[in-house]
Image: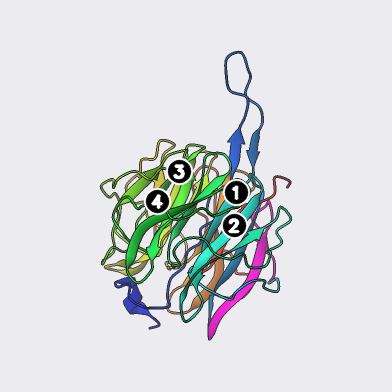
Amino acid sequence: MKYLHNFYTQGKSSKKTYNRGKSFGYQILGFGSGVAAAALIVTQKAIFAYGQISGGDTNISNLVNSSGVVGSDVTGVGTVRRMASGDTYGEDKGIIAYGYNGSANISLSNLVNNSGVVAADVTGVGTARRGQAASGFGSDKVIFAFGFTSANTNLSNLVSNVGVVATDTAGVGTARTYLDGVKYGGDKAIIAYGNDGAATNVSNLVSNAGVVASDTGGVGTARTYSGGVTYGGDKAAFAYGAGTAAGYTAIKNLVSNIGVIAADVTGVGTARSSTAQVGYGGDKGIFAYGWNDSYVTLSNLISNTGVIAADVSGVGTARGDGASAGYSTSA
């Protein structure tokens, strides 16, 4: 059973996914006295990249079209690594940062343009770490938060709307790793679950200015290696994970448009950990890849009402510990 101990501890292990381009970016324009709301700006496409495969790490990527179809492998760009995370910035582009290269935590980043092309490494800013959460916030920015350095941390780094990563911000909330973040309510984020020495269900809200709030008491099954994705424009769902009494799980917890996590919903699809997840088509999402005593390529779509569909046969190299981000406002 490969790296199962990492579901319960967070030492110098090599196992974990974070992805984190889970949400789709969007912006509501034109609110104000006497001004009608303009069109909703949403990303339509997405990318899965990096991760751990059988025998080592990778930098391959797979593009997801606006119908949720995963494309075949694309030759990798940037440092081979796992446990990176990412999300959408600047409304139609992505950033993937941090991770573990097989011997050390790293802080470099790779930008993804609005055609889904991954750029070369950018020298890292902020403390090198792995297993951190990432989420969009505001209309066009990203936050990386928490993770594992030489111990669990709660520091964060904000990313501007031109993809520049800022220096460390002092942490708020319980230090933990192997968690995920996701956008809700149009311009805010929630970071939840993870490992603080054991699997936990604590969460932290993030304002539309990127300020992390103190801990909120947990709801749902405590677990690690779960993933979050935005659906329906302003809501979110956390699903899958490990560290439960049953080991791997497919349970789901919905998040309202005011950031309230609901109780467990019976899972759909193969129970697993270390998925990558991302929004597509403006208001839907996809969970893909992962680990269930072996790497898998299958995927599960989540509708714009938060319903997760049955497994879809996988495309691309089986892997876990990958990252993801939404890109492009054109279908």
Q: Could you tell me if the residues under marks 2 and 1 are in contact, i.e. CB atoms within 8 Å? A: yes
In this rendering, the answer to whether 229 lies above or below 199 is above
Left or right, residue 85 beside residue 132: right
Camera sees residue 178:
no
Q: Which residue is mark 1?
A: 89
**Disc 4 versus disc 3: distance between alpha carbons?**
12 Å
Camera sees residue 83:
yes
Q: Could you tell me if the residues under marks 3 and 1 are in contact, i.e. CB atoms within 8 Å? A: no
Q: Is residue 56 magenta?
A: yes
**Disc 2 versus disc 4: distance between alpha carbons?**
18 Å
> Which amino acid is tagged 4?
Ile
Residue 130 coordinates in the image, percent (x, y): 44, 68
Q: Which residue is mark 2?
A: 95
User: Which residue is painted at 63% across and 17% down in the image?
Assistant: 35
> Which amino acid is tagged 1?
Tyr
- Of marks 2 and 3, which one's residue comes earlier in the chain? 2
What is the magenta range? 54-72
Count the marks: how many? 4
Indicate the quadrant where residue 232 lies: top right
Closer-to-camera residue (193/283): 193
Indicate the quadrant where residue 38 lies: top right
Between circles 4 and 1, the one closer to the viewer is 1
- Of marks 3 and 1, which one's residue comes earlier in the chain? 1
**Disc 2 versus disc 1: distance between alpha carbons?**
7 Å
> Which amino acid is tagged 2?
Ile
**Disc 3 versus disc 1: distance between alpha carbons?**
13 Å
* Residue at the outermost bottom position: 55
Closer-to-camera residue (143/227): 143
Residue 328 coordinates in the image, percent (x, y): 70, 49
Q: Callout 2: few (<14), some (14-19), or many (20+) C-alpha neighbours within 10 Å?
A: many
- Of marks 2 and 4, which one's residue comes earlier in the chain? 2
Identify the element where label 3 is drawn: loop
